[in-house]
Amino acid sequence: MRTDDFWAVIDRATADRPGSPDEVAKRATAELVGRDPDEIVAWGRHLDKVMNASGKEDLWAAAYLINGGCSEDGFDNFRGWLIANGRDVVARAVREPDSLADLPAVRAAAATGAVFEAEEVLGIAEAAHREATGGDLPPSETPRTRPDPAMLWDFDNEEEMQKRLPRLSALFLEPPD
């Protein structure tokens, strides 16, 4: 499956701005169910590639700031939320995690405390494959990866956050007294 084909499924699932990543996941799953099982598997493999490409330390730090903390599973689910926002958002966030400060939902979260996670997006291929075939998605040859938590810089170090992610820090960290 080509990259464009993978993102076309997400684009169609977000065509009229559904209210939630759960709705994006339902729409994408419904589209994939009608395809050949090999295409569903290929879509899932491409999702693994997107997850691996987005498994960056500074993106995890951005998720930590935005969500008020972020576990390993939380980081995966945050990237699911990013995917539900489309190719451009993911590409920009991977290149420059601090660019997430430009998203209206993220800016609003600074006041509301909203948390951005979408585990259901990560299960699109599995759900579609199960519905289409009655069986589980074959195991991936390249498991999803993320940085080793023991090797991360200290996300509670506000000075480091301000240096690496100045725009998000301005939104989510309390100004010094």
Image: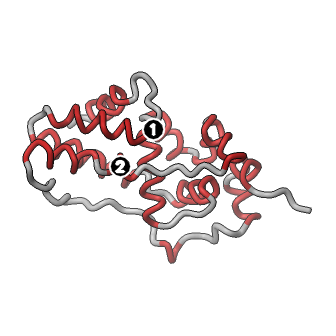
Q: Neighbour class for label 1 at 10 Å: few (<14), some, many (≥20)?
A: few
Residue 130 at x, y percent in the picture: 14, 49
Residue found at the very far top of the displayed protein: 16
Task: Give the residue at x 9% y 36%.
Answer: 36
Residue 162 in the image: x percent, y percent? Answer: 74, 57
Kindly identify the amino acid type of the residue bearing the numbered disc 2: Glu
Write the residue at 20% across / 36% down. 32
Q: Amino acid at mark 1?
A: Ser
Quadrant position of residue 40: top left
Taking the spot 62% from the left edge, 53% from the top edge, the residue there is 66
The numbered mark, 2 or 1, whose residue comes first in the sequence reads 1
| Secondary element at image label 1 | loop
Using residue 115 as the reference point, say whether residue 142 is left or right of it. left
Q: Quadrant of the C terminus?
A: bottom right
Query: Residues under labels 2 and 1: Cα distance?
Result: 11 Å
Residue sticking out furthest to the right:
177
Q: Please provide percent x and percent y for residue 4.
A: 30, 30
- The residue to which callout 2 is attached is 120
